[in-house]
Image (cartoon, coloured by chain):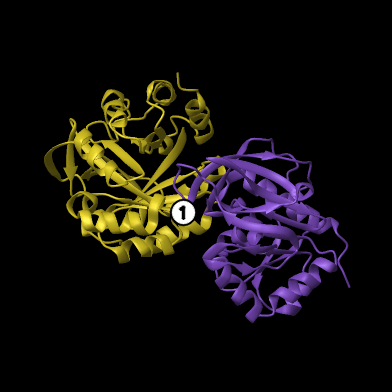
């Protein structure tokens, strides 16, 4: 499995939110490119970048920082946060991102999603955020009624190549990923799944690697890296533990 | 010795990340399409993303096809990256077909990815098919980062590396002082940096031509 160290940008800085709550922010690096450089130097194979201001505004707000990160590191990056129209998606790709992560708009605007899949193929990741198995929208401040498994299965038939599944109830808590729910979602699709939320120790990564279905291709880790619970190199080793 | 490497700018691709990666390994990198600057370099990198026919059009319009062939003849190490590797070959079938630089014999064709989606985007382990200064210190089956729909078919003697995506394909080639990789070393973490560092080493070890 691939480790995706996470860099969330707010007001130009690298921060982490707890459970997606904008009022529970912890600031880490003044320049997000410093965090990117650090993870890349430790051997990261991919970076996951979220423009939190963009997620709120509905359009990219930190293009400069994203461009700087892309130019700084020797690994690909994927970027999400407020990508709701073709121009925003193009701007992120032009800034040097290898993949774009589409959230709310993927669920709200099926023609837009289809157009993006037709145009950008497997550069597209659809982010599905869940609270207790239900899909949450709008930068997590809005709750929904649909079951995540159903949504993922339906979007897969539309050709979505990769999903990012975040369990909000564990995100930023470092208390362990929601593996049972992730497994349920992964089994409903042939697409690749990136797991996000709750990783706080290497044992969490080992159990993800050993007990998830084979299409769970990676895991996002944020707070645990910023707080030096383990290194990127250790995390990569933990994720290399072969699945059963 | 600190190698001076020119990254050939023909208007396609994000060259800044290649430049940064070269600087990271201690080489002096210059993005340029000026003949005199390229002639003064210890090594030449031909980068590129996008479509082959359009790229060759620009390369020819800038007279870079003759210049790159001249540098090859002068013994200067040349490294093609991604589309830059493909351009080193005789021709492609992309978009109705086009002639390449012809520094490596063989053609470029669409990936036979079977049921998998093209383009191939992601990390794939690379198997080295022959010993090379470019691959020194990089274990076989080390993953590199790919973004491509086409791949070359080099002659057996020139095949340096291969990877699998549905079917196996050639992802690195070497013939005398001409090298090429289908993956992006500048996006391939420490293994990619090692490869670029190896290339810089080859450039530094090659006597500067008159």
Given the current orientation, which residue lies at the most extreme left position? A145
Using the image, determine if residue A242 lies above or below residue A47: above
SS under mark 1: helix
B17 sits to left or right of A201: right
Chain B colour as displayed: purple
Using the image, determine if residue A31 lies above or below residue B166: below
Chain A colour as displayed: yellow
Q: Quadrant of the C terminus of chain A?
A: top left
Q: Is residue A147 visible?
A: yes
| Residue in the foreground of this view, choosing between B61 and A222 | B61
| Residue in the foreground of this view, choosing between B157 and A105 | B157
Residue B99 in the image, given as x and y percentages of width and height: 65, 69
Q: Is residue B1 visible?
A: no
Q: Which residue is mark 1?
A: A33
B80 sits to left or right of A84: right
Residue B178 in the image, given as x and y percentages of width and height: 77, 58
B99 sits to left or right of A170: right
Residue B13 in the image, given as x and y percentages of width and height: 54, 65
Q: How many marks?
A: 1
Given the current orientation, which residue lies at the most extreme front position? B96
Residue B168 in the image, given as x and y percentages of width and height: 60, 41
Using the image, determine if residue A212 lies above or below residue A88: above
């Amino acid at each position: 499995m691939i480790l995706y160290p996470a860099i969330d940008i707010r007001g130009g800085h690298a921060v982490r939110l707890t459970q997606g709550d904008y009022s529970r922010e912890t600031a880490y690096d003044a320049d997000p490119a410093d965090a990117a450089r650090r993870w890349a130097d430790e051997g990261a194979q991919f970076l996951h970048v979220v423009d939190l201001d963009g997620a709120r505004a509905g359009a990219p707000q930190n293009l400069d920082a994203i461009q700087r990160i892309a130019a700084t590191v020797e690994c690909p990056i994927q970027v999400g946060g407020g990508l709701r129209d073709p121009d925003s998606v193009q701007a992120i790709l032009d800034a040097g991102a290898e993949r774009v992560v589409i959230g709310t708009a993927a669920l709200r605007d099926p023609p837009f999603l289809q157009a993006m899949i037709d145009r950008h193929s497997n550069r597209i990741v659809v982010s599905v955020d869940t609270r207790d198995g239900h899909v949450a929208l709008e930068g997590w401040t809005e709750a929904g009624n649909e079951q995540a498994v159903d949504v993922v299965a339906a979007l897969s038939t539309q050709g979505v190549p990769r999903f990012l599944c975040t369990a909000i109830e564990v995100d930023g808590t470092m208390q362990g990923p929601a593996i049972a729910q992730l497994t349920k979602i992964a089994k409903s699709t042939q697409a690749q799944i990136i797991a996000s939320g709750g990783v706080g120790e290497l044992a969490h990564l080992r159990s993800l690697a050993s007990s998830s279905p084979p299409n769970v291709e990676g895991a996002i880790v944020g707070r645990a890296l910023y707080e030096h619970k383990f290194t990127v190199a250790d995390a990569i080793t933990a994720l290399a533990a072969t699945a059963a | 010795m600190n190698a001076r490497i020119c990254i050939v700018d023909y208007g396609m691709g994000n060259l800044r990340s290649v430049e940064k990666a070269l600087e990271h390994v201690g080489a002096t990198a210059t993005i340029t399409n000026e003949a005199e600057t390229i002639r003064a370099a210890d090594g030449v990198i031909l980068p590129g993303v996008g479509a082959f026919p359009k790229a060759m059009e620009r390369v020819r319009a800038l007279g870079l096809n003759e210049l790159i062939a001249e540098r090859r003849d002068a013994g200067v190490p040349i490294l093609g990256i991604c589309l830059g590797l493909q351009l080193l070959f005789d021709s492609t079938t992309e978009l109705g077909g086009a002639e390449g630089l012809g520094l490596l014999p063989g053609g470029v064709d669409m990936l036979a990815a079977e049921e998998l989606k093209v383009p191939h985007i992601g990390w794939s382990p690379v198997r080295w098919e022959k010993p090379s200064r470019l691959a020194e210190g990089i274990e076989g089956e080390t993953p590199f980062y790919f973004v491509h729909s086409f791949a070359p078919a080099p002659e057996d003697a020139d095949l340096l590396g291969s990877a699998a995506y549905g079917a196996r394909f050639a992802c690195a080639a070497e013939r005398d002082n001409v090298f090429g990789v289908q993956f992006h070393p500048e996006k391939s973490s420490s293994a990619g940096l090692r490869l670029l560092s190896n290339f810089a080493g080859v450039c530094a070890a090659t006597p500067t031509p008159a």
